[in-house]
Amino acid sequence: RNVQALGFDSPTDFFDRCYEDGQLAVVEEFILTQAFDKFVRIPDYAKLKLFVNLDGRNVAAGQMGNMLTALRDRYG
C-alpha cells in the first residue's frame, strides 16, 4: 500500500518494476513474511485462514512453492 510515496502510480506499477529489476520474488517474500508476522499475533489465529495475493509471474516461475512451505513451517 501507499506505493505513491515510492513514486509509483499503482501497486501494479510497483510489482512490474520489481519484475523488470529481477527482484519480484525477494519483494514478495518480504511482503508475505510481514503478513505472516502480523497474522500470528491475532488471538486464536490457528482457527482462522490467511488469504494472500500472489503474483502469477512468481507462481509460473515455480518460485512460490518453497517460499510458502518455508513460511508455513516457520509460522506453523
Image (spheres, rainbow, N blue to C red):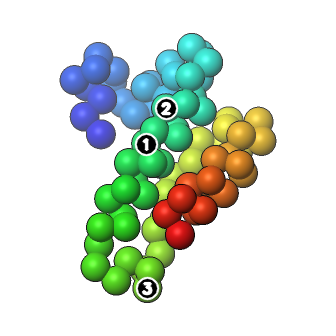
Q: Is tag 3's residue or tag 2's residue first in the polypeptide sequence?
A: 2
Q: Whole-percent x and y of residue 56?
A: 66, 42
Compute the Cα span from label 3 to label 2: 28 Å
**Can see residue 16?**
no
Task: Name above or below for residue 35 compared with residue 50.
Answer: above
Instruction: Identify residue for label 2.
Output: 27
Tag 1 and tag 2, C-beta contact below 8 Å: yes
Which circle marks residue 61 in the picture?
A: none
Compute the Cα span from label 1 to label 3: 22 Å
Relative horizontal placement of residue 70, taking residue 59 as reference (left or right) = left
**Can see residue 26?**
yes
Which circle marks residue 31 in the picture?
A: 1
Q: Whole-percent x and y of residue 33?
A: 45, 48
Going 52% across and 38% down the picture, which residue do you hit? 28
Q: Quarter holding the N terminus? A: top left
Which amino acid does the dot numbered 2 rest on? Answer: Val
Task: Name above or below for residue 76 compared with residue 61.
Answer: below
Going 36% across and 64% down the picture, which residue do you hit? 39
Compute the Cα span from label 1 to label 2: 6 Å
Which amino acid does the dot numbered 1 rest on? Answer: Ile
SS for dot 2: helix
Tag 1 and tag 3, C-beta contact below 8 Å: no
SS for dot 3: helix
Instruction: Identify residue for label 3.
Output: 47
